Image (tube, coloured by chain):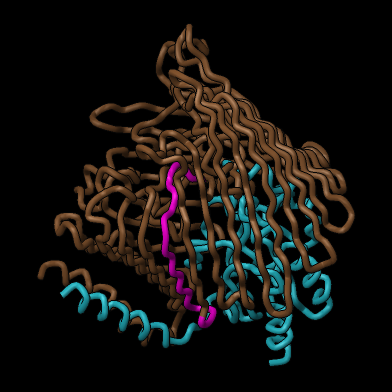
Chain colours: A brown, B cyan
Amino acid sequence: MNKYKYIKLPVIIILFSANANSQGNFRGSNLLEYQLGNIPGLKPEHQSSLYDQLNLSYNYKSITLQTRIEQYYPSFDDNKSYTSISQYRAKFKTQELSVTIGNIYPSFGKGLLLRTYEIPGSIWEDRGYRIRYGFYKDLEGAEIRYQLGKFKIKGVYGKVLDVTLPPTLSKNERRPDLVQGAELKFQHKKLALGSIFMNHKIAGNSDNYVSAFVKSRITKNLSLYTEFALKAGSDAELKFDNDSSYGFYLSLNYVKKSLGVSLELKDYKNFSIGSGISDPPTLIKEHSYKLLNRSTHVPILTNERGYQLEVYYRLPNNNLITFNHSIAHNEISESQSHLFNEFFAEYQTQIGGQVFANFFLDYSSDPFTNEDNRYSGGFAFDIGHNKASSIIESQIQFVERKVIETDKFYNFYFSYQFNIRNKLTTSALLEISKDPFLLNENEEYAFYPGGTLSYRPNNKHHIILFYGKRRGGPACNSGVCYDVLDFQGLEIRILSHI
Amino acid sequence: MKLIKYFFGLVLIVNISSYSTMGQSIFNNTFVDIEGNEVQLSEMKGEKLTVLDFWATWCKPCIKSIPKLIQLSEEFKDSGVNFIGVNEDSPRNSSKVKPFSYSLGITYPVILDSDQVLMNDLLINSLPTLIIVNSEGEIVYTHVGYSNNDEIILKQKIEALLNE
């Protein structure tokens, strides 16, 4: 019965909004997902669960109030179910001043010291807890931003959520990191200078960090951003030896007519903060192709150096060439080091105005996962029909992986999608893998067939139905990489905007 | 019991869907554009309509839609309709936004929302999302996702809104 107290708040907000609408704006969204199935191979084969996330927002003049209610009910374990007001936020904003209290998403600089985020529409679940909840890493506390002429100051205080821990744990367990800090920024024309101070406390330990950054448009075509951050107060802070704790990031952009170039450098040493409150730029391409997205490198913040170069060139008729090269070097010990490298090339073209085609080739080597050579290629055709469209996509990957013996295997991905005016979409997809890590005894191939049906009755509601077997593994989305569980069964997702 | 609870939840959602959305000025926000300029949204809005396209460099349908949006922005530029690209790339990809925008030939302004402030305020939960805002600051149309030929729907919607 105690759970029902949580229902009262949205009801009050909704009733209140009937009157409030005449004075401001009420908005909301809801994500509901039902699953009937399990991780392939686990018993029972079919277990059901229901996850719901309701977001409500009210705005009147300078004030915004927001809340999020999450609920999860699995059929298999009552101890894993929960109903909670997982977020609340009150914001007061004028031209110069912004004050926010509650659950917020602040960052310092490029995230070398602090970055919080949300992956909208994503649901987190790991194999250990088997509890589903919204995928966000927020800070519960307060943020104040103030602008005075060319100066901007941002102050942050609060506890950061460890996204790997489920809502059934206590708040203290889920928010082990206390952060308090400020960022001062001075902007004059195309030049911005900034400095950051941050104090971080966890489990009785307290550390101070400082950072400085420069952002400048050097010429009309060339821009620069660089940031250097370090743990303050230790003897090793400026020696740059093995005991130092620092992060360095630099990016250069060059543009001219149809050419765009981005070059980034990184050097991170002993720079993992607390339970993972920082998120320095990874400098590894975030691929939208399924097989490449899975074959990513996650930076090792204890020791990683590298660079990323990305070049874009637009040919006539909107044809676009993209080239990417990235290197990440990890010195694990004096005798052990790893060098990740990747080369990626893509060609996007339009054929006759109704066909949009992409072709790509990729080579990468990731000794950290023992995958010495990965060769990938593929294509996608998006074909416009009268009031409808089709997308055909195919990808292939050959991997050489040496653990004790060298395994050589292929991964395949095929999909076909038919779409009628963005209202009704149906798709079929199939993944096939010969990866020995995925094969059961006497199995030659692992198959992952699936189908989706998606329907938008209007621009406020979206219903998506999936049935089949979905391959999990590493996935990168909105700049964040995480592990997705395999799934086999039926999944229904309903997205609503209010 | 759980089913009853969720039935209640669904009824609640459907009910609140029926409430009308009143105007909120989203123009009272300051951002940095890809050129490094600090810009006030109110200074960028269209005389009649403002089209905000939320996109990211890693989002495949976003990239497909952009050449079509460039065409639409050119078509409606003398009709009091301004287009603004709202980039949602995180620090992981933000350094690529300017070179990528140039090579795509985007002619309308692109602002950076790397902390997802505007996206969170508007409860946007997928990319691409395109919203059309009238001169009062009210959101009058939302379009989620992009499929080939969606620009025809957008064009018809803009024309209908201009004729209202």
For the view shown, which residue lies furthest in the bottom direction? B164
Which quadrant of the view contains residue A14? bottom left
Q: State the image coordinates of residue A68 (x, y, percent, origin top left).
A: 34, 64
Q: Is residue A47 visible?
A: yes
Residue drawn 82% across the image and 39% down it: A219
Taking A476 as reference, is B81 above or below it?
below
Q: State the image coordinates of residue A92 (x, y, percent, origin top left).
A: 44, 63
Which quadrant of the view contains residue A333? top left
Taking B97 as reference, is A278 above or below it?
above
For the view shown, which residue lies furthest in the front direction? A442
Query: How many labels, in total?
Result: 0
Residue drawn 44% across the image and 61% down it: A121
Q: Which is the main secondary structure of the residues drawn in magenta?
A: strand
Q: State the image coordinates of residue A436 (x, y, percent, origin top left).
A: 44, 34
In the rendered image, residue A472 lying in the magenta stretch gets the answer yes
Left or right of B164: which side holds B104?
right
Residue drawn 47% across the image and 77% down it: A461
Front position in the image: A497 or A44? A44
Front position in the image: A176 or A367? A367
Residue drawn 56% across the image and 38% down it: A410
Q: Which image quarter holds the N terminus of chain A? A: bottom left
Which quadrant of the view contains residue A351? bottom right
Q: State the image coordinates of residue B109 (x, y, percent, origin top left).
A: 74, 60
In the rendered image, residue A81 lying in the magenta stretch gets the answer no
Left or right of A192: which side holds A256?
right
Start-end of magenta stretch: A457-476
